[in-house]
Amino acid sequence: MSTVNNPPAPASPAARPDDAALDQALRPKSWDEFIGQAALKENLRILIAAAKQRNEPIEHVLLYGPPGLGKTSLAHLIAREINANIRITSGPAIERVGDLASILTNLLPGDILFIDEAHRMNKLIEEVLYPAMESRSLDIIIGKGPSARTIQLELPPFTLIAATTRLGMLSGPLRSRFGVTFRLDFYTTDDIGKILARSAALLDIAADAEALGIIAGASRMTPRVANRLLKRARDYAAVHGSGRLTTDAARTALHLLEIDELGLEPTDRRILETVVTKFRGGPVGLAALAAATAEEEDTIEEVYEPYLMRIGFLERTARGRMATAVAWQHLGIPMPEQPRLMES
C-alpha cells in the first residue's frame, strides 16, 4: 500500500519543492544582503579573509540549527566570497561509498562540497569522509576476502560545508574534523521585517509596512516561513484586493491559512492542546505525545518543538514535555490550581 507524503504546512520551516525557485530568487549575493546572524557572519568573514591571505582553501565548516534559517544560503555566499564552485548534495542522496567517491574525485582544486542534511549519512559514508577531510585522500577497497586490496587516491584541496538540524546525530569523529562549527539561531522580529522588505522589493510586491509587520510576527522567526507567507498574502491581495498587500489582506490571508498572530498553525495548537487537556499540562514523553497527536516523533522534535520552546509555550524536562502558563493562556483554557501541600 502506498503512502502519500503531504507537503509541510505553510508555517512549517521544512523545505518544500516550490521553495527552490523562491530561495534562488531571494538568496543574498553579499554579506550586506544577508540579514541577521551578525556574530556568525563576522566569524566567517575572518575565516575567509585569513584563508585568502594564506592562499589556501578555507577550513571545513559545519552549520547547524533549525530548518529554514539560511544554512544553504550561507554555503552559497561563502562560495561566492571565495570565488569557488559549489557542488551540492545531501546526506540521503549519498547511498553508497561509490557515490561519495564519484563526487570527491570529480572536485576541482578549491571547490566547495556542500552536504545538506548531513546527519542522514550512514556511518560507512562518514568513515570514508574522515581521510578525505583530514589528509585529502580517498581509500577505496577493491575486491573481497583475502584478495581484497586498497587503493589510495589523492584528492585536490577542497572545503566541505555540512548543514544539519540534528548535530547530535553526527558522530564525534566526524564533528571533530570540521575546523569551525556555527549554530544559526532564530531571527529577531526586526530582522524578519527587513528580510520581508527586501523580498517584497525583489518580488515587486507593493506592501504596507504594517502588513509586513503582521507577516513577520507570524513567521516563526524563520526567513523561509516569512517568504512563504509573503507569497500567500500576495496571492490573496491579487485575487481579492487591489493587488497591494494591506494589513487587512495580510490578516485575512493568515486567517485562511489557519495561522495566528504568533505563527501557530493547527499542528502546533493540537500539540499544545494534547499536552494541556489529555495530559493535564504534562509532563508527557515524546513517544506518548507523538501517538496522541498522530505525528512522528522526529517531526515534533525537529519542526514544532523548537519554536514552541523558543516562545515559551513548551518546556522540556527530564520527565517529559510540559505546557507553560502562557500556553494555557494562549489556548484560552483555565490553568488548574496547584494542590496545596499538607501541613505537617
Image (tube, grey):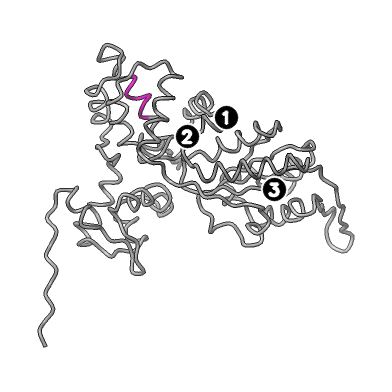
Q: Is residue 100 magenta?
A: no
The residue range painted magenta reads 229-235
Q: Nearer the viewer, residue 119 or 230?
A: 230
Badge 3 local density, few (<14 within 10 Å), some, or many (20+)? some
Measured in 3D between alpha carbons, the distance from the residue under mark 2 to the one under mark 1, in whole angstroms, is: 10 Å
For the C terminus, the image quarter is bottom left
> What SS does tag 1 mark?
loop
| N-term-proximal mark, 2 vs 3 | 2
Residue 124: x and y, percent?
69, 56
> What SS does tag 3 mark?
loop
Residue shown at 79% from the left, 36% from the top? 108
Q: Which residue is mark 1?
A: 30
Residue 322: x and y, percent?
28, 61
Residue 84: x and y, percent?
71, 33
Q: Which residue is mark 3?
A: 59
Q: Which residue is mark 2?
A: 35
